[in-house]
Amino acid sequence: MNLELLESFGQNYPEEADGTLDCISMALTCTFNRWGTLLAVGCNDGRIVIWDFLTRGIAKIISAHIHPVCSLCWSRDGHKLVSASTDNIVSQWDVLTGDCDQRFRFPSPILKLQCHPRDMDKVLVCPMKSAPVLLTLSDSKHVVLPVDDDSDLNVVAAFDRRGEYIYTGNAKGKILVLNTNTQELVASFRVTTGTSNTTAIKSIEFARKGSCFLINTADRIIRVYDGREILTCGRDGEPEPMQKLQDLVNRTPWKRCCFSGDGEYIVAGSARQHALYIWEKSIGNLVKILHGTRGELLLDVAWHPVRPIIASISSGVVSIWAQNQVENWSAFAPDFKELDENVEYEERESEFDIEDEDKSEPEQTGADAAEDEEVDVTTVDPIVAFCSSDEELEDYKALLYLPIAPEVEDPEENPFGPPPEASVQAAGPEDALAGGEKKQRQPSSEGGPAKKKARTTTIELQGVPSDEVHPLLGVKGDGKSKKKTAGRPKGSKGKDKDFPFRPKPYRGDRPSFPVEALGSSGPGGGGGGGGMKGRAEGGLATAGSLVAQAYKQHDIGGMD
């Protein structure tokens, strides 16, 4: 479909539900890539499911973390994906191969992370009860951003549209604008209610087009500002919001807010129920309320970058909201006729002849002469919807789609080489065990060399409590917290998360290495599959292992 035709005269926001995306396990967060062709979904069992949004099918599954994935962000070119889990780990992934490039371990849970809009080497991380941290991936260094009040460390942060500035907000309503490269204070202001009282900043979101951004605050009001006005006011300015959006009837608190792809609409998800409120930014009027299943709680909302489509997450399922496409037959030419069956067409004399021998050729002038000009059909013009306002060309190295391997019903074990048993026998007896270990480390779907272990960097933050629990897992100190049951079974070893693709179980004699080394994260998924009778350290197989087993079929069967 031609993306230029999307700028229609009608409304440009979704109107009704358009199906769901079931990731098998519980979905917690989702984000589109820059073009809207791929949707990454972080799940409760630590996996990242990447959907091809055009076909609505799973393009790749990355076994990313042991604990639930709480935040995701694509790089600008779409080749990298940065994720955070509730065990305070931030990881960078290669989307094509599914390999982990590097990891960062933080002392406190990660509330949000965001890749730099232009510089793919920088990532902004918002740890819990800590000042925001700017990571540099190439040298694994970090910079702690300055805050307004050292005693108030409930800080949220976001890059502006082009990454030139970082906006931070604390629980006292103070917004700081920092230069990304120097971390110097450029501008600041305080968000106040009708009186001099302040309100806590919950989130800051920028539009993909234009200079507008919104601030979601604890007083249940969404304020829309112009970034150019903020920079003009400077330090301790008093800018007025362009719009104040709220639910005056129900006083709804907002869980998640974001702009539409063109920046003309704002969607906010209710924190009480699965309901999406859509406002028109220029006027500030409420144009649509989308209601999901009653009784469900909303977790995340994402608007498609170039289409009027919204993805929302509730009860572990991704819901898609889109426009109702109605066929308008009256829009065709007046002499258009709908045929019930094929009709033989009678050709008129010389109708389809390349040259009419009998026709005299008059001199061509004006528009007729322009028709004889050669038309360039080889040059590909850039799609305007995919280009920024300061760019003329598209990024031709960008990753828009993922290749999917065809599913073969009866695949051969190793069609392009000797059988694995022969290669083990050819090696010396002392190398048999080492060869078995290499086989275990080898991805079954690719058959390539063993994957390099990702480098892990520990980020030291002064004065940050290390006993905090992520809000997704429950309240700190609660003995019945979900932290014990979330994620994969307890038998999963830390080294297994470095190798997201695992080979099929050994079908010969029992291997010489202990069964406990596999734990419950072995190929069977539940600790007892594939002929292995070992149990997880925590006891019998759990319901979560059934989900893991289903995913193993995807990983092993060649879906990736």
Image: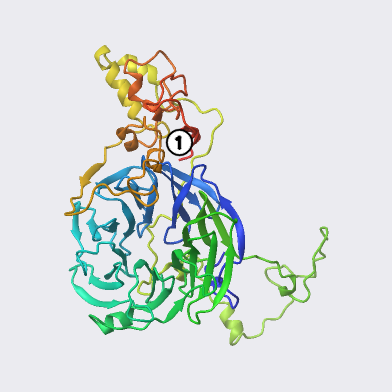
**Image location of residue 393, percent across then percent down:** 38, 68
Secondary structure under the numbered disc 1 in the rendered image: helix
Q: Is residue 449 in view?
A: no
Residue denoted by label 1 = 555
Quadrant assignment, res 198? bottom left
Quadrant assignment, res 14? bottom right
Which residue corresponds to the image point at 39% horizontal and 28% vertical from the top-left? 538
Placement of 466 over or under 436, stated as above or below: below
Indicate left or right for 127 with 411 as reference. left
Image quadrant holding the C terminus, namely top left
Image quadrant holding the N terminus, namely bottom right
The amino acid type of the residue labelled 1 equals: Asp
Quadrant assignment, res 275? bottom right
Indicate left or right for 338 with 426 as reference. right
Placement of 50 over or under 16, stated as above or below: above
Which residue corresponds to the image point at 20% horizontal and 50% vertical from the top-left? 459
**Image location of residue 143, percent across then percent down:** 18, 59
**Image location of residue 38, percent across then percent down:** 46, 54
**Image location of residue 222, percent across then percent down:** 43, 73
Indicate left or right for 478 with 231 as reference. right
Taking depth in this image into account, of 7 and 294 the one nearest to the observer is: 294
Q: How is the image coloured?
A: rainbow
Which residue corresponds to the image point at 18% horizontal and 53% vertical from the top-left? 461
